[in-house]
Amino acid sequence: MSPAIEGRAEELLKAKNFCVVSTIRPDGSVHAAPTWVDVQDGRPVLNTAEGRAWPRNLQRDPRVTLTVQNMENPYEYVTIRGRVGERTTDGADEHIDALAMKYMGQESYPLRQPGEQRLIVRIDPEHVHVYGS
């Protein structure tokens, strides 16, 4: 059974903190990208656009490490190692709008590009550790 995101880890993901998504490139090097994060049912939830590097990397190799640093205390952060549990476009447009409200205070995601296909990536955590709390 996977560890659930709960307690302080859940608080860090629910707050307006950015997430660094680290994936493995085809050549074996690490690709790290900042993004928005959400938590649902004890799992981290990410939203991206099809065609970007990190979701392509995850399609090839589902292993991922997430790091969410407390914006108010940068010495506190959570790392989550896990694997992709689900990739879906269902509800992705509504989800990015909810994240836009969380991070930007806007009802609709203002950076959407014409023809862009949004994607939800749900992570099954395998290891969760909070540092500095």
Image (cartoon, rainbow, N blue to C red):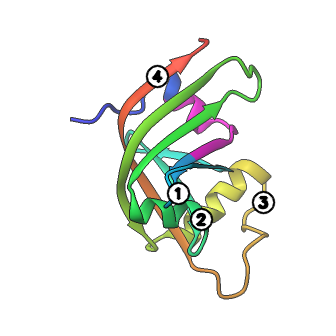
Marks 1 and 4: which is nearer the front? 1
Look at mark 2 in the image and give the residue it sits on.
53
Q: Position of residue 44 (x, y in %)?
A: 47, 45
Answer whether residue 17 is magenta in the image. Answer: yes
Marks 3 and 1: which is nearer the front? 1
- Per the model, the C-alpha gap separating discs 2 and 4 is 26 Å
Farthest residue to the front: give it.
Answer: 27
Task: Please provide the residue range marked out in magenta.
Answer: 10-21
Judge whether 83 appears above or below 4 on screen: below
Look at mark 3 in the image and give the residue it sits on.
106
Name the side, left or right, on which 70 lies relative to 133: right
Q: Position of residue 49 (x, y in %)?
A: 60, 71
Looking at the picture, which amino acid does disc 2 mark?
Ala
Look at mark 4 in the image and give the residue it sits on.
129
Looking at the picture, which amino acid does disc 3 mark?
Gln
Quadrant assignment for the C terminus: top right
Marks 2 and 1: which is nearer the front? 1
Marks 3 and 2: which is nearer the front? 2
First-in-chain label (2 vs 4): 2
Looking at the picture, which amino acid does disc 1 mark?
Arg
Marks 2 and 4: which is nearer the front? 2
- In this view, the residue in front, 50 or 37, is 50
Q: Secondary structure at mark 4?
A: strand
| Pointer 2 local density, CA inside 10 Å: few below 14, some 14–19, many at least 20 | some
First-in-chain label (3 vs 2): 2
Judge whether 118 appears above or below 37 on screen: below
- Per the model, the C-alpha gap separating discs 4 and 3 is 31 Å
Q: Secondary structure at mark 2?
A: helix
User: Mark 2–mark 1 contact, CB under 8 Å?
Assistant: yes
At x 49% / y 40%, what residue is drawn?
65
User: Mark 3–mark 2 contact, CB under 8 Å?
Assistant: no
At x 72% / y 68%, what residue is drawn?
108
